[in-house]
Amino acid sequence: MPVGFLYFTIFKKRLDFFLSCKHNSVTMKIKTALLFIVCGVISLTNLHAQKTITGFQAPESAIRSGDKLFVSNIGGEQPNPLALDGNGFISELSADGNIIQQKFNKAVLNGPKGLAIIGNTLYTADVNRVVGLDINSGEQVFELNFPEAKMLNDLCSIGDKYLAVSETINGKVYLIDVANKSYNFLGSINGANGLTYDAKTKQLFACGMGMNMDGTGKLYSQHLDSKDTTFNELANSPTGIFDGLEFTDEDHLLVTDWHGADSTKGRFVIYNLKDHTSKTYSIDAGPADVGYDKSSHTFYLPQMMKNDLLIENLNKLKAQ
C-alpha cells in the first residue's frame, strides 16, 4: 500500500473525529485532530524504520535475551580473528539498540565470535576456547579449552545442557557437555561456521564457507540421536561463503552470505526446508552471525566491514 494513501486514510479518520466532537471547542477539536495526525505519522515512521548502531570493532555475532542484546567484537584497530591478543569484547545493548555497556565482559577475551545462552550464562566462542559469562554481571563463570582449535566460530545451545561449536579452519563441529566441561566430535564440514538447532526434530543444522573459504559452502544437517558423524547436505542447497544461521520459523532457515571476500554486497539466503527452494536478498558487505527474533521478525545483523549493527524487520526486504 503506498505511503501517501496511508497518510490520507489517517487524515480522513482524524477529520471525521474532529467533525464528530460536538462537545468540544473548535480550538480543542483542531488541536486534537492535528495531534492524532502527527501521532499517526510517527507511528508509521517507527513501523518502517531501520536502525544502525555504530561504535563496534569488527562485530561478529548478535543475540537477544529478553530486553537485552549482546554483540561480540573481535576488537582491535586491525582485527585478527585468530590472534590471542586480549582485545576482544562483548557489548551490551537494549533490545532497541541503545548501547548500555560497550565492554560488558569483565574477563579478558581475545576474538569472541559466536554467542549462545543457557540459563543465566552467556557463552562465546573465543578462538581456542569457549568462555561463559554471567549474563547479569559479565563475570567469567565457565571456560573450556580446545587445544587443537585455530578458530572456534559459531555456537548454539542444545537444550539446557549442551552447546554445539564450529571450528572453521579445521572444518569441524563439536558437542559440548556444559556440566562436565567436556566435548565430543560431531562431524566435519568444509569451512564449518553457522549452527542452529531444531529441538522438535533433534536436528543440528550447519553451514560452511567452503574449502579455503572459496564460496562453495553449503547447508547441512545431522540428527543428534544418530551415532553417525556425517553431516548430510540439504537437498538443492544454495552455495556461498556462509556465516550466520538461524530459523525464521519451523520451515525456513536464514543464512548470511559474504558473497565473495571482495564483494561490495552480501546476501541473505532463506532456504525452505519443505520444498528445498531458496530466496535471496541483497544486503551490505560483510554480513556476519545474524541474530533473529521470531516474534517481531526482527534481525540483528553485525556488519563486520562497516563496524556497525543493523536492526531491521525481515519482512521489509525484497527478494532478488
Image: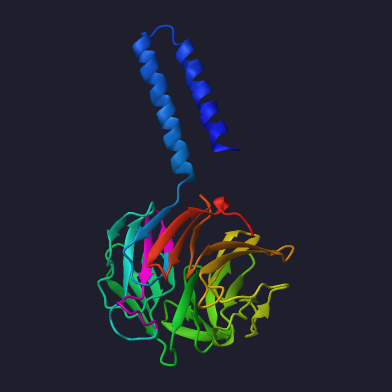
What colouring method underlies this structural image? rainbow
Q: At which x and y percent is residue 264?
A: 51, 70
Q: Nearer the viewer, residue 12 or 217?
A: 12
| The one of 27 and 22 positioned closer to us in this rendering | 27
The answer to if 65 sits in the magenta stretch is: yes
| Image: 134 above or below 146 | above
Q: Quick one: which residue is furthest to the right in this view?
A: 275
In the displayed structure, 188 sits above or below 261; it is: below
Question: Is residue 135 in view from this perspective?
Answer: no
Res 123 seen here: yes
Residue name at image x 45 percent, y 82 percent: 152
At 44% from the left and 89% from the top, the residue drawn is 149
Tell me if residue 219 comes above or below residue 31 in the rendering.
Answer: below
Question: Could you say which quadrant of the image residue 123 lies in?
Answer: bottom left
The residue lying furthest to the top in this view is 23
In screen coordinates, is 305 left or right of 318? left
What quarter of the picture does the N terminus occupy?
top right
Q: What residue lies at 41% left-to-right and 75% top-to-bottom? A: 113
Residue 253 location, x and y as percent? Answer: 61, 64
Q: Quadrant of residue 33?
A: top left
Q: Quadrant of residue 28?
A: top left
Q: Position of residue 97 (x, y in %)?
A: 37, 55
Compare residues 160 and 49 and report the one nearer the observer: 49
Estimate the x, y position of residue 103 in percent, counting from the top left.
27, 67
Can you name the residue that lies furthest to the bottom here?
A: 148
Q: Which residues are magenta?
A: 63-81
